């Protein structure tokens, strides 16, 4: 079985470099375009999904619905693949977080994840890893043998949690993986084991994403 793990299309907050997290921001027009280009890329590759899972947030749900189109796979919502919560820091521009000493702790989330301690309603990495492990064990692995292609549409931080778990990566390397909007990561599920086959496949030209360059901050949101 092939497992496809992808990030949603672009939102205005992605474009503005704001920390999105659990805030339910919709896709913008460019994000819808990216989702359609990704859908068309899957079709060119002859990929027909037997199941599609999505985060409950509308930016992921609409991405999943666009890719599903009129295909046979129902779109299933799973709370387990929702984005990591960053608590009261959501909505703040990453550039502001970087320059304000009052935001030292949230900056550890990205620069020193091993020593990050969430505050308030923010999630810990351990909490995110736990729900992704349970999703893989309870919702994905049971599909082996009856499904050929399964898609999960989720978010930047959660995609990285999938990759860390599958690749047995250390937490310190969490943010080293580039995952722009609508990037696709492909894993093989065989004998109840999951191995990565390809990372960061794009069905569009990355240099045009968001209308130009300067996307370094977007890898965090």
Image (tube, rainbow, N blue to C red):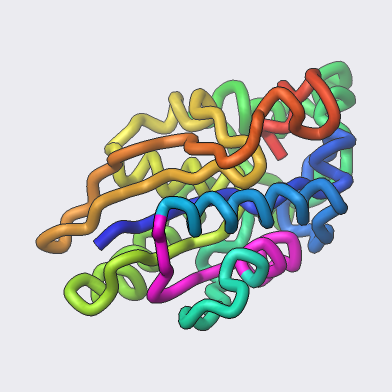
* Residue at image location 33% in from the left, 33% down from the top: 169
Is residue 37 placed above or below 54 in the rendered structure? Answer: above
Q: Is residue 50 magenta?
A: yes
| Location of residue 220 in the rendering, given as x and y in whole percent from the top left corner | 68, 34
Q: Nearer the viewer, residue 118 or 150?
A: 150
Q: Nearer the viewer, residue 57 or 1?
A: 1
| Location of residue 70 in the rendering, given as x and y in whole percent from the top left corner | 59, 79
- Image quadrant in which the N terminus is located: bottom left
Q: What segment carries the magenta color?
A: 46-64
Q: Nearer the viewer, residue 75 or 158?
A: 75
Is residue 70 placed above or below 21 in the rendered structure? Answer: below
Q: Is residue 39 magenta?
A: no
> Relative to residue 6, is residue 213 drawn left or right?
right
- Choose top left, top right, bottom left or bottom right for residue 83: bottom right
Is residue 210 placed above or below 196 in the rendered structure? Answer: above
- Image quadrant in which the C terminus is located: top right
Whether residue 52 is visible here, answered yes or no, is yes
| Location of residue 121 in the rendering, given as x and y in whole percent from the top left corner | 71, 57
- Choose top left, top right, bottom left or bottom right for residue 99: top right
> Relative to residue 220, is residue 81 drawn left or right?
left
| Location of residue 176 in the rendering, given as x and y in whole percent from the top left corner | 50, 24
* Residue at image location 83% in from the left, 60% down from the top: 26
């Amino acid at each position: 079985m092939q497992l496809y793990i992808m990030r949603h299309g672009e939102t205005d907050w992605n474009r503005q470099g704001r920390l999105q997290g659990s805030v339910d921001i919709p896709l913008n027009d460019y994000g819808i375009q990216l989702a359609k280009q990704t859908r068309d890329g899957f079709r060119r590759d002859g990929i027909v999904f037997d199941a599609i899972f999505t985060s409950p947030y509308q930016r992921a749900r609409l991405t999943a619905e666009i890719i599903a189109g009129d295909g046979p796979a129902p779109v299933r919502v799973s709370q387990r693949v929702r984005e990591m919560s960053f608590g009261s820091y959501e909505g703040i521009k990453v550039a502001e977080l970087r320059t304000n000493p009052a935001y030292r702790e949230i900056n550890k989330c990205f620069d020193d994840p091993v020593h990050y301690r969430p505050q308030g309603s923010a999630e810990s990495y351990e909490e995110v890893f736990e729900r992704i492990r349970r999703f893989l064990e309870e919702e994905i692995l049971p599909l082996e043998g009856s499904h050929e292609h399964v898609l999960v549409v989720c978010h930047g931080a959660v995609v990285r949690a999938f990759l860390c778990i599958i690749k047995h990566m250390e937490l310190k390397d969490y943010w080293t993986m580039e995952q722009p909007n609508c990037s696709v990561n492909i894993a093989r599920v065989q004998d109840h084991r999951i191995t990565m086959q390809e990372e960061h496949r794009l069905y569009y030209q990355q240099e045009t994403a968001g209308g130009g360059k300067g996307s370094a901050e977007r890898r965090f949101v």
